[in-house]
Image (cartoon, helix red, strand yellow):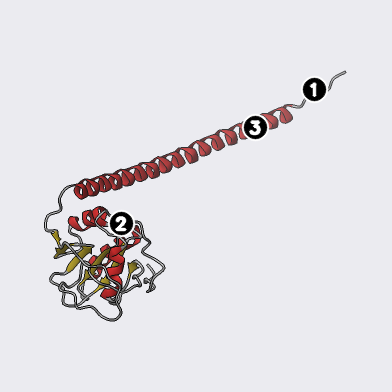
Amino acid sequence: MSKKRSPELTERQARLAAVKQAQRRSERRRSLLIWSFTGVVVLALVGTTVTVLARQAARNASVQAAAKAPIEGVTTVPNLSRNHVAGTVAYPLNPPVGGDHSEVDQNCGYYSAPVAPENAVHSLEHGAVWITHDPNLPPAQLNELKALAAKSTYVLVSPRSGLPSTVVASAWGVQLQLTSADDARLAAFVAKYANGPQSPEPGAACAGGTGTPDAS
């Protein structure tokens, strides 16, 4: 003969089942909230990343388009000699855009101290863009030049006294004088002439020579 459950036991079991059911509902709501919040965060991060990448792509496209067109202010110096010589060279331009130079090139990168023009000209021969700037250039503009040097293995940046303008970008046989490092023409100049066809030895490395660039 089966035993009947007491009313107290049945009521206790019912309360326990109700508590467990409430706990399960609470856990489901908590999980839903967590996943919803996570989804919102992920979507926000994805959206931000896509926006940043889209803006960067637009800037790159703008720079490349500007590089394909003639760059206002660029001067050309033809028929430059290319002899390897010892000692200093009396260049007609400051900074020089070519001519006789040291047999050792200046390793590309950013330098906080001046570099010898004879070595830098050898780098120009290899396709480098040499960006010289006033030694008292403001830090914000200096960071612009550091960023350009970090993006390309064919950019050499160094301070130089007696410049005709605040910033001067030079490649073999061409030069652009600027009043500010944030001038949009500077990035276009780098895109156009870094390892460009104007160099006598395009593709030659701007490394393995002299100098250790400053750490970024």
Q: Residue 171 got which mark?
A: none
Q: Is mark 1 on a helix, strand or loop?
A: loop
User: Is label 2 or label 3 in front?
Assistant: 2
In three-dimensional space, the C-alpha distance between marks 2 and 3, rounded to whole angstroms, equals 80 Å
Q: Is mark 2 on a helix, strand or loop?
A: loop
User: Is label 1 or label 3 in front?
Assistant: 3
Label 1 or label 3, whichever comes before in sequence order:
1
Residue holding disc 1: 4
How far across and how far down the image is residue 39, in percent?
44, 39
65 and 118: which is toward the camera: 118
The type of residue carrying mark 1 is Lys
The image quadrant of residue 210 is bottom left
Q: Residue at x 21, y 50 (%)?
A: 67
How far across and how far down the image is residue 169, in percent?
21, 64
For this view, does 70 lie left or right of residue 103? left
The image quadrant of residue 36 is top left
185 and 98: which is toward the camera: 98
The type of residue carrying mark 2 is Asn
Label 2 or label 3, whichever comes before in sequence order:
3
The type of residue carrying mark 3 is Arg
Label 1 or label 2, whichever comes before in sequence order:
1
Count of labels shown? 3
User: Is label 1 or label 2 in front?
Assistant: 2
The image quadrant of residue 213 is bottom left
Q: Residue at x 32, y 72 (%)?
A: 111
In three-dimensional space, the C-alpha distance between marks 1 and 3, rounded to whole angstroms, equals 19 Å
Give the farthest residue toward the right. 1
Q: How crowded is mark 3: few (under 14 residues within 10 Å), some or many (20 or more)?
A: few
Q: Residue 195 got which mark?
A: 2
- Give the quarter of the figure containing the C terminus: bottom left
Residue holding disc 3: 15
